[in-house]
Protein backbone atom coordinates (compact mmCIF):
# COMPACT_ATOMS: atom_id res chain seq x y z
CA UNK A 1 0.00 0.00 0.00
CA UNK A 2 1.44 3.36 -1.04
CA UNK A 3 1.83 5.88 1.75
CA UNK A 4 0.36 9.24 0.77
CA UNK A 5 2.60 11.74 2.53
CA UNK A 6 2.39 14.91 0.43
CA UNK A 7 -1.29 15.65 -0.21
CA UNK A 8 -1.45 19.28 -1.26
CA UNK A 9 0.74 22.35 -1.52
CA UNK A 10 -0.49 25.93 -1.93
CA UNK A 11 1.88 28.60 -3.26
CA UNK A 12 1.20 32.34 -3.20
CA UNK A 13 3.35 35.15 -4.67
CA UNK A 14 6.49 33.05 -5.12
CA UNK A 15 8.50 34.13 -8.17
CA UNK A 16 6.36 33.45 -11.23
CA UNK A 17 3.96 31.27 -9.23
CA UNK A 18 0.90 33.13 -7.97
CA UNK A 19 -1.73 31.43 -5.82
CA UNK A 20 -1.26 27.94 -7.25
CA UNK A 21 -2.59 24.75 -5.68
CA UNK A 22 -0.56 21.57 -6.26
CA UNK A 23 -2.41 18.35 -5.46
CA UNK A 24 -0.19 15.27 -5.30
CA UNK A 25 -1.39 11.72 -5.83
CA UNK A 26 -0.58 8.73 -3.60
CA UNK A 27 1.45 7.04 -6.35
CA UNK A 28 3.38 8.69 -9.19
CA UNK A 29 2.91 12.40 -9.92
CA UNK A 30 4.58 13.98 -12.95
CA UNK A 31 5.10 17.76 -13.17
CA UNK A 32 5.68 19.24 -16.65
CA UNK A 33 5.48 22.60 -18.39
CA UNK A 34 6.62 24.55 -21.39
CA UNK A 35 9.76 25.84 -19.72
CA UNK A 36 11.79 24.78 -16.72
CA UNK A 37 11.18 27.96 -14.72
CA UNK A 38 7.70 27.13 -13.53
CA UNK A 39 8.57 23.52 -12.75
CA UNK A 40 11.67 24.68 -10.89
CA UNK A 41 9.53 26.98 -8.75
CA UNK A 42 7.39 24.01 -7.74
CA UNK A 43 10.52 22.18 -6.60
CA UNK A 44 11.78 25.34 -4.88
CA UNK A 45 8.46 25.67 -3.07
CA UNK A 46 8.68 22.08 -1.88
CA UNK A 47 12.20 22.84 -0.70
CA UNK A 48 10.99 25.80 1.34
CA UNK A 49 8.21 23.68 2.83
CA UNK A 50 10.81 21.13 3.86
CA UNK A 51 13.11 23.62 5.60
CA UNK A 52 15.28 24.67 2.65
CA UNK A 53 17.26 27.90 2.50
CA UNK A 54 15.13 31.00 1.93
CA UNK A 55 16.06 33.74 -0.53
CA UNK A 56 14.19 37.05 -0.63
CA UNK A 57 14.70 37.11 -4.43
CA UNK A 58 12.08 34.34 -4.64
CA UNK A 59 9.32 36.78 -3.60
CA UNK A 60 7.45 38.36 -6.50
CA UNK A 61 8.37 42.02 -7.06
CA UNK A 62 5.68 44.15 -5.44
CA UNK A 63 4.45 41.41 -3.12
CA UNK A 64 4.98 41.68 0.63
CA UNK A 65 5.66 38.01 1.15
CA UNK A 66 5.61 34.53 -0.35
CA UNK A 67 3.72 31.75 1.41
CA UNK A 68 3.92 28.01 0.91
CA UNK A 69 1.45 25.79 2.73
CA UNK A 70 1.30 22.01 2.69
CA UNK A 71 -0.75 19.08 3.94
CA UNK A 72 1.08 15.91 4.93
CA UNK A 73 -0.38 12.59 6.02
CA UNK A 74 1.77 10.97 8.69
CA UNK A 75 1.49 7.96 10.94
CA UNK A 76 0.82 9.11 14.49
CA UNK A 77 3.45 6.63 15.71
CA UNK A 78 6.15 7.78 13.29
CA UNK A 79 9.27 9.64 14.42
CA UNK A 80 8.13 12.70 12.44
CA UNK A 81 4.75 12.82 14.20
CA UNK A 82 6.37 12.36 17.62
CA UNK A 83 8.88 15.13 16.91
CA UNK A 84 6.11 17.45 15.68
CA UNK A 85 4.02 16.84 18.80
CA UNK A 86 7.05 17.50 20.99
CA UNK A 87 7.23 20.93 19.33
CA UNK A 88 3.58 21.57 20.21
CA UNK A 89 2.09 20.79 16.78
CA UNK A 90 -1.32 19.16 16.53
CA UNK A 91 -2.31 16.44 14.05
CA UNK A 92 -5.83 16.52 12.62
CA UNK A 93 -6.83 12.91 11.86
CA UNK A 94 -3.28 12.07 10.83
CA UNK A 95 -2.87 15.24 8.75
CA UNK A 96 -0.04 17.63 9.55
CA UNK A 97 -0.26 21.22 8.27
CA UNK A 98 3.00 23.02 7.43
CA UNK A 99 3.50 26.59 6.28
CA UNK A 100 6.51 28.73 5.44
CA UNK A 101 6.34 32.52 5.00
CA UNK A 102 9.15 34.48 3.37
CA UNK A 103 8.98 38.28 3.53
CA UNK A 104 10.35 40.56 0.83
CA UNK A 105 12.93 41.73 3.39
CA UNK A 106 14.24 38.17 3.75
CA UNK A 107 12.65 37.20 7.06
CA UNK A 108 11.40 33.63 7.23
CA UNK A 109 8.80 32.07 9.54
CA UNK A 110 7.57 28.51 9.84
CA UNK A 111 4.39 27.05 11.33
CA UNK A 112 3.72 23.40 12.06
CA UNK A 113 0.36 22.04 13.13
CA UNK A 114 -0.81 25.53 14.14
CA UNK A 115 2.32 26.37 16.13
CA UNK A 116 5.21 28.68 15.28
CA UNK A 117 8.40 26.60 15.11
CA UNK A 118 12.06 27.10 14.10
CA UNK A 119 12.67 26.58 10.39
CA UNK A 120 15.27 23.94 11.27
CA UNK A 121 12.50 21.71 12.63
CA UNK A 122 10.99 21.47 9.14
CA UNK A 123 14.33 20.13 7.92
CA UNK A 124 14.33 17.53 10.69
CA UNK A 125 10.89 16.33 9.65
CA UNK A 126 11.88 16.34 5.97
CA UNK A 127 14.66 13.85 6.72
CA UNK A 128 12.00 11.46 7.99
CA UNK A 129 9.40 12.10 5.29
CA UNK A 130 10.87 13.07 1.92
CA UNK A 131 14.03 12.15 0.00
CA UNK A 132 14.99 14.65 -2.72
CA UNK A 133 16.93 13.41 -5.76
CA UNK A 134 17.88 16.14 -8.17
CA UNK A 135 20.67 17.40 -10.40
CA UNK A 136 22.58 18.70 -7.38
CA UNK A 137 22.24 15.35 -5.63
CA UNK A 138 23.35 13.58 -8.80
CA UNK A 139 26.56 15.57 -8.86
CA UNK A 140 26.99 14.79 -5.19
CA UNK A 141 26.81 11.07 -5.94
CA UNK A 142 29.84 11.46 -8.19
CA UNK A 143 31.99 12.09 -5.14
CA UNK A 144 33.57 9.01 -3.51
CA UNK A 145 32.60 10.26 -0.04
CA UNK A 146 28.93 10.42 -1.06
CA UNK A 147 29.21 6.98 -2.64
CA UNK A 148 30.63 5.60 0.61
CA UNK A 149 27.74 7.15 2.53
CA UNK A 150 25.23 5.62 0.11
CA UNK A 151 26.87 2.21 0.42
CA UNK A 152 26.92 2.43 4.22
CA UNK A 153 23.23 3.30 4.35
CA UNK A 154 22.45 0.47 1.93
CA UNK A 155 24.42 -1.96 4.12
CA UNK A 156 22.29 -1.04 7.14
CA UNK A 157 23.13 -2.45 10.57
CA UNK A 158 26.00 -4.54 9.22
CA UNK A 159 27.97 -1.30 8.81
CA UNK A 160 26.11 1.02 11.21
CA UNK A 161 26.99 -1.00 14.34
CA UNK A 162 30.75 -1.38 13.73
CA UNK A 163 30.94 2.17 12.38
CA UNK A 164 29.48 3.57 15.61
CA UNK A 165 32.05 1.67 17.67
CA UNK A 166 34.82 2.69 15.26
CA UNK A 167 33.83 6.37 15.44
CA UNK A 168 33.89 6.32 19.26
CA UNK A 169 37.33 4.65 19.33
CA UNK A 170 38.60 7.08 16.66
CA UNK A 171 37.50 10.10 18.71
CA UNK A 172 39.17 8.66 21.82
CA UNK A 173 42.36 7.98 19.87
CA UNK A 174 42.48 11.60 18.72
CA UNK A 175 42.05 12.81 22.30
CA UNK A 176 44.75 10.45 23.58
CA UNK A 177 47.11 11.45 20.75
CA UNK A 178 46.58 15.14 21.51
CA UNK A 179 47.32 14.65 25.20
CA UNK A 180 50.43 12.59 24.43
CA UNK A 181 51.58 15.28 22.01
CA UNK A 182 51.22 17.91 24.71
CA UNK A 183 53.01 15.84 27.34
CA UNK A 184 55.98 15.05 25.10
CA UNK A 185 56.42 18.30 23.17
CA UNK A 186 55.93 20.55 26.20
CA UNK A 187 58.12 18.51 28.56
CA UNK A 188 60.57 21.39 29.15
CA UNK A 189 57.79 23.89 29.83
CA UNK A 190 56.10 21.49 32.21
CA UNK A 191 59.40 20.83 34.05
CA UNK A 192 59.89 24.57 34.50
CA UNK A 193 56.33 24.89 35.74
CA UNK A 194 56.96 22.08 38.25
CA UNK A 195 60.12 23.78 39.57
CA UNK A 196 58.29 27.07 40.09
CA UNK A 197 55.44 25.33 41.87
CA UNK A 198 57.83 23.37 44.07
CA UNK A 199 59.70 26.55 45.08
CA UNK A 200 56.46 28.36 45.89
CA UNK A 201 55.04 25.49 47.90
CA UNK A 202 58.28 25.21 49.90
CA UNK A 203 58.17 28.95 50.61
CA UNK A 204 54.56 28.73 51.84
CA UNK A 205 55.31 25.63 53.90
CA UNK A 206 58.31 27.34 55.54
CA UNK A 207 56.17 30.30 56.61
CA UNK A 208 53.38 28.05 57.97
CA UNK A 209 50.63 30.66 57.66
CA UNK A 210 47.35 30.11 59.47
CA UNK A 211 43.96 30.98 58.04
CA UNK A 212 43.08 34.57 59.04
CA UNK A 213 46.51 35.15 60.59
CA UNK A 214 47.16 38.26 58.52
CA UNK A 215 43.96 39.90 59.82
CA UNK A 216 44.73 38.96 63.44
CA UNK A 217 48.28 40.37 63.23
CA UNK A 218 47.04 43.57 61.61
CA UNK A 219 44.65 44.13 64.52
CA UNK A 220 47.33 43.33 67.09
CA UNK A 221 49.85 45.69 65.47
CA UNK A 222 47.30 48.46 65.47
CA UNK A 223 46.62 47.92 69.18
CA UNK A 224 50.29 47.70 70.21
CA UNK A 225 51.21 50.75 68.17
CA UNK A 226 48.65 52.89 70.03
CA UNK A 227 48.90 51.30 73.51
CA UNK A 228 49.59 54.53 75.44
CA UNK A 229 46.71 56.41 73.85
CA UNK A 230 44.37 53.49 74.46
CA UNK A 231 45.42 53.20 78.13
CA UNK A 232 44.95 56.93 78.72
CA UNK A 233 41.51 56.90 77.11
CA UNK A 234 40.46 53.91 79.20
CA UNK A 235 41.60 55.62 82.43
CA UNK A 236 39.72 58.84 81.66
CA UNK A 237 36.58 56.88 80.79
CA UNK A 238 36.87 54.82 84.00
CA UNK A 239 37.24 57.95 86.14
CA UNK A 240 34.18 59.52 84.48
CA UNK A 241 32.10 56.48 85.23
CA UNK A 242 33.39 55.31 88.64
CA UNK A 243 35.28 58.29 90.00
CA UNK A 244 38.96 59.05 90.66
CA UNK A 245 40.29 57.93 94.11
CA UNK A 246 42.74 60.83 94.05
CA UNK A 247 39.87 63.37 93.67
CA UNK A 248 37.24 62.65 96.35
CA UNK A 249 35.36 65.85 95.47
CA UNK A 250 34.90 64.82 91.86
CA UNK A 251 31.49 63.90 90.48
CA UNK A 252 31.18 60.61 88.56
CA UNK A 253 28.38 59.05 86.55
CA UNK A 254 27.92 56.07 88.89
CA UNK A 255 27.37 58.35 91.90
CA UNK A 256 24.85 60.51 90.04
CA UNK A 257 22.91 57.52 88.79
CA UNK A 258 22.90 55.98 92.29
CA UNK A 259 21.46 59.23 93.70
CA UNK A 260 18.75 59.28 91.08
CA UNK A 261 17.87 55.69 91.84
CA UNK A 262 17.58 56.38 95.59
CA UNK A 263 15.29 59.35 94.97
CA UNK A 264 12.70 57.48 92.96
CA UNK A 265 13.08 54.23 94.86
CA UNK A 266 11.78 55.89 98.04
CA UNK A 267 8.39 56.74 96.48
CA UNK A 268 7.97 53.98 93.87
CA UNK A 269 5.14 52.34 95.83
CA UNK A 270 2.85 55.29 95.05
CA UNK A 271 2.93 54.94 91.24
CA UNK A 272 3.58 51.95 88.98
CA UNK A 273 4.94 54.15 86.21
CA UNK A 274 7.58 55.62 88.50
CA UNK A 275 8.39 52.12 89.79
CA UNK A 276 9.18 51.08 86.22
CA UNK A 277 11.49 54.06 85.80
CA UNK A 278 13.22 53.18 89.07
CA UNK A 279 13.94 49.69 87.76
CA UNK A 280 15.38 51.08 84.56
CA UNK A 281 17.63 53.49 86.48
CA UNK A 282 18.83 50.54 88.56
CA UNK A 283 19.72 48.69 85.37
CA UNK A 284 21.68 51.71 84.14
CA UNK A 285 23.63 51.74 87.41
CA UNK A 286 24.50 48.06 87.05
CA UNK A 287 25.57 48.57 83.42
CA UNK A 288 27.75 51.54 84.37
CA UNK A 289 29.39 49.46 87.09
CA UNK A 290 30.09 46.60 84.63
CA UNK A 291 31.55 48.94 81.99
CA UNK A 292 33.70 50.67 84.60
CA UNK A 293 35.06 47.27 85.74
CA UNK A 294 35.82 46.26 82.15
CA UNK A 295 37.64 49.55 81.53
CA UNK A 296 39.77 48.97 84.62
CA UNK A 297 40.62 45.44 83.46
CA UNK A 298 41.36 46.65 79.90
CA UNK A 299 43.79 49.27 81.17
CA UNK A 300 45.51 46.74 83.49
CA UNK A 301 45.94 44.18 80.67
CA UNK A 302 47.09 46.64 78.02
CA UNK A 303 50.83 46.17 77.59
CA UNK A 304 52.85 48.56 75.42
CA UNK A 305 55.47 45.90 74.60
CA UNK A 306 57.85 47.15 71.88
CA UNK A 307 59.46 43.70 71.59
CA UNK A 308 56.09 42.09 70.83
CA UNK A 309 55.28 44.87 68.38
CA UNK A 310 58.56 44.23 66.56
CA UNK A 311 57.81 40.50 66.39
CA UNK A 312 54.33 41.17 65.00
CA UNK A 313 55.65 43.51 62.32
CA UNK A 314 58.32 40.99 61.34
CA UNK A 315 55.71 38.25 60.98
CA UNK A 316 53.49 40.54 58.97
CA UNK A 317 56.39 41.29 56.63
CA UNK A 318 56.92 37.56 56.08
CA UNK A 319 53.25 37.07 55.28
CA UNK A 320 53.31 40.09 52.96
CA UNK A 321 55.99 38.33 50.91
CA UNK A 322 53.55 35.46 50.40
CA UNK A 323 50.53 37.63 49.55
CA UNK A 324 52.62 39.62 47.09
CA UNK A 325 53.35 36.44 45.12
CA UNK A 326 50.49 34.03 45.64
CA UNK A 327 47.31 35.88 46.62
CA UNK A 328 45.81 39.02 48.07
CA UNK A 329 45.12 37.42 51.45
CA UNK A 330 46.51 34.49 53.41
CA UNK A 331 43.30 32.61 52.57
CA UNK A 332 44.13 33.12 48.87
CA UNK A 333 47.71 31.97 49.49
CA UNK A 334 46.53 28.79 51.17
CA UNK A 335 44.07 28.14 48.29
CA UNK A 336 46.90 28.62 45.79
CA UNK A 337 49.05 26.19 47.72
CA UNK A 338 46.31 23.56 47.64
CA UNK A 339 45.82 23.95 43.90
CA UNK A 340 49.56 24.10 43.30
CA UNK A 341 50.11 20.86 45.19
CA UNK A 342 47.50 19.12 43.02
CA UNK A 343 49.04 20.50 39.84
CA UNK A 344 52.54 19.51 40.97
CA UNK A 345 51.35 15.98 41.64
CA UNK A 346 49.93 15.93 38.12
CA UNK A 347 53.19 17.22 36.62
CA UNK A 348 55.31 14.86 38.67
CA UNK A 349 53.13 12.02 37.42
CA UNK A 350 53.75 12.83 33.74
CA UNK A 351 55.98 9.84 33.20
CA UNK A 352 53.35 7.50 34.58
CA UNK A 353 50.65 9.27 32.56
CA UNK A 354 52.70 9.03 29.37
CA UNK A 355 53.05 5.31 29.95
CA UNK A 356 49.31 4.90 30.50
CA UNK A 357 48.43 6.97 27.44
CA UNK A 358 50.94 5.14 25.26
CA UNK A 359 49.44 1.81 26.25
CA UNK A 360 45.91 3.09 25.59
CA UNK A 361 47.06 4.61 22.29
CA UNK A 362 48.42 1.26 21.09
CA UNK A 363 45.32 -0.61 22.27
CA UNK A 364 43.03 1.84 20.46
CA UNK A 365 44.98 1.46 17.22
CA UNK A 366 44.67 -2.29 17.48
CA UNK A 367 40.94 -1.97 18.17
CA UNK A 368 40.52 0.38 15.22
CA UNK A 369 42.35 -2.06 12.98
CA UNK A 370 39.92 -4.82 13.90
CA UNK A 371 36.87 -2.61 13.48
CA UNK A 372 38.18 -1.25 10.16
CA UNK A 373 38.53 -4.83 8.90
CA UNK A 374 34.95 -5.53 9.99
CA UNK A 375 33.79 -2.43 8.11
CA UNK A 376 35.71 -3.48 5.01
CA UNK A 377 34.13 -6.95 5.08
CA UNK A 378 30.61 -5.55 5.59
CA UNK A 379 31.06 -2.94 2.86
CA UNK A 380 32.46 -5.51 0.45
CA UNK A 381 29.47 -7.79 1.00
CA UNK A 382 26.98 -4.90 0.64
CA UNK A 383 28.84 -3.52 -2.38
CA UNK A 384 28.29 -6.80 -4.25
CA UNK A 385 24.55 -6.67 -3.58
CA UNK A 386 24.30 -2.94 -4.32
CA UNK A 387 26.25 -3.25 -7.58
CA UNK A 388 24.19 -6.25 -8.66
CA UNK A 389 20.95 -4.36 -7.99
CA UNK A 390 22.14 -1.27 -9.90
CA UNK A 391 23.33 -3.43 -12.80
CA UNK A 392 19.90 -5.05 -12.96
CA UNK A 393 18.26 -1.62 -13.02
CA UNK A 394 20.57 -0.56 -15.85
CA UNK A 395 19.46 -3.55 -17.87
CA UNK A 396 15.92 -2.19 -17.57
CA UNK A 397 17.14 1.26 -18.60
CA UNK A 398 18.40 0.17 -22.04
CA UNK A 399 21.96 -0.49 -20.83
CA UNK A 400 21.87 -4.31 -20.84
CA UNK A 401 25.63 -4.75 -21.16
CA UNK A 402 26.68 -2.20 -18.54
CA UNK A 403 28.21 -3.45 -15.33
CA UNK A 404 28.55 -1.50 -12.10
CA UNK A 405 31.06 -2.46 -9.44
CA UNK A 406 32.50 -0.92 -6.29
CA UNK A 407 36.22 -0.46 -5.77
CA UNK A 408 36.99 -0.75 -2.06
CA UNK A 409 40.64 -0.22 -1.32
CA UNK A 410 43.06 1.10 1.29
CA UNK A 411 46.20 3.20 0.95
CA UNK A 412 49.33 1.81 2.54
CA UNK A 413 51.47 4.10 4.65
CA UNK A 414 54.70 3.83 6.57
CA UNK A 415 53.76 6.41 9.18
CA UNK A 416 50.89 6.59 11.65
CA UNK A 417 48.63 3.99 10.06
CA UNK A 418 46.57 1.17 11.49
CA UNK A 419 47.04 -2.47 10.56
CA UNK A 420 44.29 -3.86 8.35
CA UNK A 421 44.80 -7.15 6.62
CA UNK A 422 48.39 -7.31 7.78
CA UNK A 423 49.27 -3.94 6.21
CA UNK A 424 49.64 -0.46 7.75
CA UNK A 425 47.06 1.74 6.02
CA UNK A 426 45.75 5.28 6.17
CA UNK A 427 42.61 5.65 8.25
CA UNK A 428 40.05 8.34 9.02
CA UNK A 429 36.81 8.93 10.93
CA UNK A 430 34.86 6.47 8.74
CA UNK A 431 37.39 3.65 8.56
CA UNK A 432 40.26 2.82 6.25
CA UNK A 433 38.24 2.23 3.07
CA UNK A 434 38.26 4.33 -0.07
CA UNK A 435 34.98 3.58 -1.84
CA UNK A 436 34.36 4.38 -5.50
CA UNK A 437 31.59 3.37 -7.87
CA UNK A 438 32.88 2.07 -11.21
CA UNK A 439 31.10 1.55 -14.54
CA UNK A 440 31.94 -0.68 -17.48
CA UNK A 441 29.40 0.57 -20.09
CA UNK A 442 29.90 -2.37 -22.48
CA UNK A 443 31.74 -5.71 -22.60
CA UNK A 444 35.48 -5.34 -22.91
CA UNK A 445 35.51 -1.83 -21.44
CA UNK A 446 37.54 -1.52 -18.23
CA UNK A 447 35.61 -0.36 -15.18
CA UNK A 448 36.14 3.36 -14.65
CA UNK A 449 34.77 5.93 -12.16
CA UNK A 450 31.22 6.74 -13.21
CA UNK A 451 32.10 10.41 -13.76
CA UNK A 452 34.62 9.34 -16.42
CA UNK A 453 33.17 6.10 -17.73
CA UNK A 454 29.72 7.29 -18.84
CA UNK A 455 28.30 9.69 -21.38
CA UNK A 456 25.78 12.30 -20.35
CA UNK A 457 22.76 10.10 -21.04
CA UNK A 458 24.42 7.03 -19.55
CA UNK A 459 25.37 8.99 -16.45
CA UNK A 460 21.77 10.08 -15.92
CA UNK A 461 20.60 6.47 -16.20
CA UNK A 462 23.33 5.22 -13.88
CA UNK A 463 22.45 7.88 -11.33
CA UNK A 464 18.75 7.08 -11.62
CA UNK A 465 19.49 3.37 -11.15
CA UNK A 466 21.65 4.15 -8.12
CA UNK A 467 18.97 6.41 -6.67
CA UNK A 468 16.19 3.90 -7.24
CA UNK A 469 18.22 1.14 -5.57
CA UNK A 470 19.31 3.49 -2.82
CA UNK A 471 15.72 4.62 -2.34
CA UNK A 472 14.81 1.01 -1.65
CA UNK A 473 16.97 1.13 1.46
CA UNK A 474 15.71 4.56 2.51
CA UNK A 475 13.06 4.61 5.25
CA UNK A 476 11.25 7.72 3.92
CA UNK A 477 7.92 7.16 2.14
CA UNK A 478 8.12 9.98 -0.45
CA UNK A 479 10.69 10.68 -3.17
CA UNK A 480 11.09 13.81 -5.26
CA UNK A 481 13.06 13.45 -8.51
CA UNK A 482 13.96 16.74 -10.18
CA UNK A 483 14.82 16.07 -13.85
CA UNK A 484 17.14 13.17 -13.12
CA UNK A 485 16.11 11.91 -16.57
CA UNK A 486 18.01 14.75 -18.27
CA UNK A 487 20.00 13.50 -21.28
CA UNK A 488 17.77 10.43 -21.71
CA UNK A 489 15.40 9.81 -24.60
CA UNK A 490 13.69 7.20 -26.73
CA UNK A 491 13.43 3.67 -25.40
CA UNK A 492 15.60 4.54 -22.39
CA UNK A 493 13.13 7.25 -21.40
CA UNK A 494 10.31 4.70 -21.47
CA UNK A 495 12.30 2.45 -19.18
CA UNK A 496 12.98 5.38 -16.86
CA UNK A 497 9.24 5.97 -16.59
CA UNK A 498 8.63 2.27 -16.00
CA UNK A 499 11.22 2.11 -13.18
CA UNK A 500 9.74 5.18 -11.49
CA UNK A 501 6.27 3.68 -11.77
CA UNK A 502 7.58 0.49 -10.19
CA UNK A 503 9.06 2.51 -7.31
CA UNK A 504 5.68 4.25 -6.90
CA UNK A 505 4.11 0.91 -5.99
CA UNK A 506 5.73 1.10 -2.56
CA UNK A 507 6.28 4.86 -2.15
CA UNK A 508 4.94 8.20 -3.21
CA UNK A 509 6.96 9.52 -6.18
CA UNK A 510 6.98 13.09 -7.50
CA UNK A 511 8.93 13.67 -10.72
CA UNK A 512 9.67 16.94 -12.47
CA UNK A 513 10.32 15.91 -16.07
CA UNK A 514 10.52 17.14 -19.63
CA UNK A 515 10.07 13.66 -21.14
CA UNK A 516 6.60 12.56 -22.33
CA UNK A 517 7.73 8.93 -22.07
CA UNK A 518 8.21 9.45 -18.31
CA UNK A 519 5.09 11.58 -17.77
CA UNK A 520 2.94 8.92 -19.47
CA UNK A 521 3.62 6.50 -16.62
CA UNK A 522 2.38 8.92 -13.94
CA UNK A 523 -0.82 8.33 -12.01
CA UNK A 524 -1.34 12.09 -11.92
CA UNK A 525 -0.05 14.60 -14.43
CA UNK A 526 0.36 18.26 -13.39
CA UNK A 527 1.25 21.07 -15.79
CA UNK A 528 2.70 24.44 -14.86
CA UNK A 529 1.03 27.03 -17.10
CA UNK A 530 2.17 30.62 -17.50
CA UNK A 531 0.13 33.73 -18.26
CA UNK A 532 1.43 37.22 -19.01
CA UNK A 533 -0.57 40.43 -18.98
CA UNK A 534 2.31 42.46 -20.34
CA UNK A 535 3.70 43.51 -16.97
CA UNK A 536 3.38 40.53 -14.65
CA UNK A 537 3.97 36.85 -15.40
CA UNK A 538 1.92 34.42 -13.39
CA UNK A 539 1.91 30.65 -13.29
CA UNK A 540 -0.66 28.16 -12.17
CA UNK A 541 -0.72 24.40 -11.80
CA UNK A 542 -3.37 22.38 -13.59
CA UNK A 543 -4.13 18.66 -13.39
CA UNK A 544 -4.23 16.98 -16.81
CA UNK A 545 -6.87 14.31 -17.33
CA UNK A 546 -8.40 12.64 -20.32
CA UNK A 547 -8.17 14.74 -23.47
CA UNK A 548 -6.15 17.44 -21.70
CA UNK A 549 -3.45 14.93 -20.84
CA UNK A 550 -3.28 13.68 -24.44
CA UNK A 551 -2.89 17.28 -25.66
CA UNK A 552 -0.07 17.94 -23.14
CA UNK A 553 1.82 14.80 -24.14
CA UNK A 554 1.35 15.79 -27.80
CA UNK A 555 2.87 19.16 -27.07
CA UNK A 556 5.80 17.52 -25.28
CA UNK A 557 6.33 15.10 -28.18
CA UNK A 558 6.05 17.41 -31.17
CA UNK A 559 5.56 20.91 -29.83
CA UNK A 560 2.09 20.85 -31.43
CA UNK A 561 -0.99 20.11 -29.39
CA UNK A 562 -3.24 19.45 -32.40
CA UNK A 563 -0.93 17.29 -34.47
CA UNK A 564 -2.81 14.10 -35.32
CA UNK A 565 0.44 12.16 -35.49
CA UNK A 566 1.56 13.51 -32.13
CA UNK A 567 -1.86 12.75 -30.60
CA UNK A 568 -1.70 9.21 -31.88
CA UNK A 569 1.77 8.82 -30.44
CA UNK A 570 0.62 10.29 -27.11
CA UNK A 571 -2.32 7.90 -26.91
CA UNK A 572 0.01 5.05 -27.77
CA UNK A 573 2.38 6.13 -24.97
CA UNK A 574 -0.43 6.21 -22.43
CA UNK A 575 -1.71 2.83 -23.52
CA UNK A 576 1.79 1.32 -23.42
CA UNK A 577 2.41 2.84 -19.97
CA UNK A 578 -0.82 1.37 -18.61
CA UNK A 579 0.02 -2.02 -20.06
CA UNK A 580 3.65 -1.98 -18.98
CA UNK A 581 3.23 -1.09 -15.34
Image: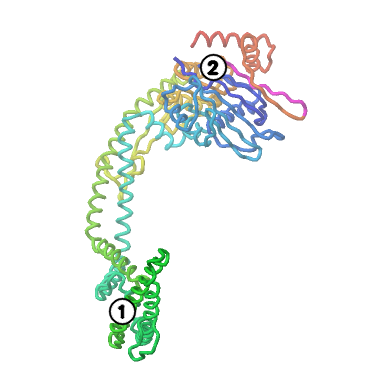
Number of dots carrying numbers: 2
> Is label 2 in a helix, a strand or a loop?
loop
Q: Residue at x 30, y 39 (%)?
A: 165
Sequence-first disc among 2 and 1? 2
Q: Residue at x 35, y 29 (%)?
A: 156
Q: Quadrant of the N terminus?
A: top left
List x then y, in percent, for residue 457.
53, 26
The question of residue 522 being in magenta is answered with no
Residue occupied by mark 1: 293
Q: Residue at x 35, y 73 (%)?
A: 287
Residue occupied by mark 2: 25
Residues at marks 2 and 1, CA–CA distance in whole angstroms: 105 Å
Looking at the picture, tell me which residue is in the foreground, 340 or 281. Answer: 281
In the picture provided, is 81 more to the left or to the right than 178? Answer: right
Main SS category, magenta section: strand
Q: Residue furthest right?
A: 534
**Looking at the image, residue 322 lies above or below residue 245:** above
Where on the picture, by quarter, is residue 33?
top right
In the picture provided, is 4 more to the left or to the right than 307? Answer: right
Residues rendered magenta in the picture? 523-534
List x then y, in percent, for residue 401.
43, 21
Amino acid sequence: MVVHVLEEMRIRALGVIDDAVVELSPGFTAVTGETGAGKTMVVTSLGLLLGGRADAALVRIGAKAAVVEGRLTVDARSAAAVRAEEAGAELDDGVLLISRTLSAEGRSRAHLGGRSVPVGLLGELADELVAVHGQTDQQGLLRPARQRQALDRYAGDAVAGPLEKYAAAYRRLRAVSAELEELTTRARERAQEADLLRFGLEEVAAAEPRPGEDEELAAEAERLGHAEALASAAAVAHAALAGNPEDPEGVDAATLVAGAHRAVEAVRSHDQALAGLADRIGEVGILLSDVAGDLAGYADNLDADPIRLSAVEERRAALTQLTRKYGETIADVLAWAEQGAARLAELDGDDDRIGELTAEHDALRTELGGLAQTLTDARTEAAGRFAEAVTAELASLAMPHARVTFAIRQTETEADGIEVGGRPVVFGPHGADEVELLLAPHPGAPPRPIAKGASGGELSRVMLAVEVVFAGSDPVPTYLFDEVDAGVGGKAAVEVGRRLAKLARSAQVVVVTHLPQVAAFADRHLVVEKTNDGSVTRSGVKAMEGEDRVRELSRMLAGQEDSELARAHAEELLEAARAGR
